[in-house]
Structure formats: C-alpha cells, structure tokens
Amino acid sequence: MSEAPVRLLYVDDDEALVRLIQRRLGRRGFEVVHAPTAEGALARLREGGIEVIALDHNLPTGTGVDFLKDLAKAGGGPAVVYVTGSAEMDIAVSALKAGASDFVPKTPGEDFLVFLEAALQQAVEKTRLRAQKEAAEREVHVARDRAELLLREVNHRVANSLALVSSLVGLQAKSVSDPIAKAALAETQSRIFAVASVHQRLYTSGDVRFVAIDEYLHGLLDHLQTSMLKEGMGATIVADLERIEVPTDRAISLGVVVTELVTNAFKYAYPPGTPGAVRVGFRAAAPGMARLTVGDDGPGWAGEGKIQGTGLGSRIVRTISDALGGEFRYEVAKGTVASLVLPLGTP
C-alpha cells in the first residue's frame, strides 16, 4: 500500500462494527470515513477524496444494490466492495451486476476482517492501475496528436518550399530562349509538382501514412492537362482510376512515373494541336498488386529502337519501377501502351 492513507467510505448503520473496522484498518493504512445511510454516502462522495467504498447490503432506506444503482446514475464512483451477511449468492451476484468490484461475506470472527482488508487492498490496486493506464493512454493520445500535427506542418512547409522551387524553375524557363532548354525546365517543373501535390494532400489528410491514389492522380492529371493545353497540345487525358490507399512514399514515386509517361504521350503521340486521347489507368491486379497503364493512339513505341528526346524520362521511369519492385514494359498494341505492375506495399 502507499504511505499516504487510503480513504475508505464505509456505508453501514452498524456503529459498533464500523468502530471496529476503523481501529483495525486504521493500523493498515486506511482512513475510514463512516456514512450510516445511502443518502449520506452519496453526499460524502460528492465532496471527493474517497478511493474505495465498503458497502453493507442492509441499509436503513433500502439495500446496497439500490445504492449501487443510484451511484451509477450519478456517474459512477470509486470501486465498491460489497458486504453481505446473507448466505444467498444471488445477492452477491446482483451486487456485482450493479457495479460492485468484489464482495465479502459478513461472518463472525477474525476471518471477515482479513477478507475485507484483502478485498479492499485489491480494489484500490485495481483502481490505481486503471487510473495509471488511463493516464498513460491519454499521454499517448496527446503525443500522437502532437506528432501528427507536427507532421502535417512539415508536409505543409515541404509543399510550400517545393511550390517556391517550381516557381523559380518557371521563371528560369521564361528567361531562356532555347526551346530544348525551355522544354526541359517545363518537364522539371512538372516533376516537382508531382511530389509537391502529395505533400499538399498530406497536411489536410487524416492519415499521413497513405494517399488515396485516385484523388491524387486526378489532381495531378488535371494539372498536366492544363499545362499541355498552354503549350498548344490538343490531346485529352482520359482517366480510369480505382480508389486504392497507397503508402505515401510509393504514391510519390507513382506520381513521378505518371508525369513522365503522360508527358511523353503528349509530346510524341500527337503533334501540337492534334486531338487524341491519353488514357491513364490504375487498378488492383493480383492480391496486394496494382497495374498502372498509360496509352495513346500515336505512331507507337514498343520500347525498342532509337529513343526520342534525351531519354531522361525513360531512365527515370525504369529506375523508379525497379525501386518499387515493379515490372515495367511496353505492350504490343496500336499506339503506345506503357504498363507497370507493382506491389502496393503494406496497407
């Protein structure tokens, strides 16, 4: 027991027994407060400071079970050890169902005091352990909420920083006249946006561990469509995206892959101003797997022969595909269809 006395409320109209309890338990670390009636006991509980209750069955204005019901209506209270002189077990069962934590038969002799003390000590220990557990859980919740808040703030700052970098790249693109350099800077700006848009979503998300891939890719594709229209491209993006929760780091990588493949489809499948469709799909495949496809109806590319452009985009796609543990290939079809089958990671 603790060095501080345990304040016990003993509810019983037997004055002689209560004095005996006070003397006996007073030497055992208890401070015994007496209430002869249920009404008096409830009033004393409202004053606070009571750690445990010993409750007699027979009270002047009812039974201990009635008191337990009133205590529950009042919002509960300390642990209750029920004391009954009756040999009928149904009384003890009724008390336990009404909220008592334990019961002790009131028998003549020393055994009653021994059993009562043991039951009270156990009830106090259980109460304190429960209070410690609840306090620890509250601390964990507070720490978790704080960590999530800080993580959202980090994502917010990262998104803002990437937006600034993207703006700087855009300013640089406007300052150069070489069309190849201008196009390279525009592609770099799109790659930065693919990463930044994930962080933008994370600081408003309820769970920063995962990204709803359909929402993320729809936003990314809308941005790519707008950018391509500004550059005079006439194709349209058609998306078929299944709602799948993807780990954040994998979602970022997928965003960069989609950006590269869609940009290549616009650049090489349809000349500027030419209408057409760039089809983007992301759907579940085998259990724990997903399949990303980007297709067009252009001249066609099967992954062989001379690479158009610098080839940087292709190297980025294959490097990321390998890092994701995926299988990237070009399918035999009219036009170009790039396919990436990859594990989703642990949800």
Image: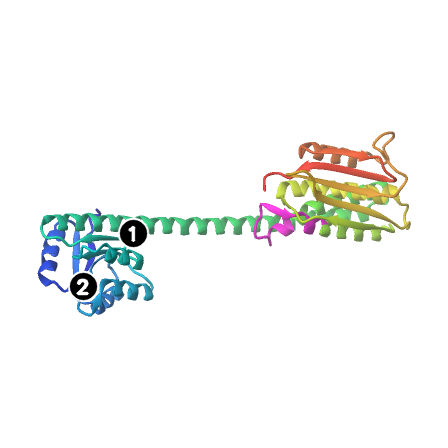
Q: Amino acid at mark 1?
A: Thr
Q: Amino acid at mark 2?
A: Asn
Say which of marks 1 and 2 sits in front: 2
Question: Relative to 216, is 21 on the left or the right?
Answer: left
Local SS, label 2: strand
Q: Residue at left 33%, top 50%? A: 130
Disc 1 and disc 2: Cα gap in Å? 25 Å
> Which percent across, then down, holds residue 322?
70, 31
Colouring style: rainbow
Q: Tell me the residue that label 1 is attached to.
A: 127
> Which percent across, then down, holds residue 248?
62, 44
Mark 1 or mark 2, earlier in chain = 2
Question: Relative to 99, is 8 on the left or the right?
Answer: left
Tell me the number on the disc at residue 143.
none
Assess disc 1: are there few (<14), some (14-19) or many (≥20) residues with their C-alpha within 10 Å of its C-alpha: some
Q: Tell me the residue that label 2 is attached to.
A: 58
Foreground pick, 205 / 346:
346
Q: Residue at left 32%, top 61%? A: 76
> Which percent across, then down, holds residue 152?
57, 51
Query: Is residue 248 something one can see in this rendering?
Result: yes
Query: Is residue 51 something one can see in this rendering?
Result: no
> Which percent across, then down, holds residue 61?
20, 70
Foreground pick, 110 / 173:
110
Foreground pick, 176 / 19:
19
Q: Residue at left 14%, top 52%? A: 25
Is residue 231 on the magenta stretch?
Answer: no
Is residue 213 on the magenta stretch?
Answer: yes
Magenta part of the chain? 199-217
Assess disc 2: are there few (<14), some (14-19) or many (≥20) residues with their C-alpha within 10 Å of its C-alpha: some
- Whether 287 is drawn above or below 163: the answer is above
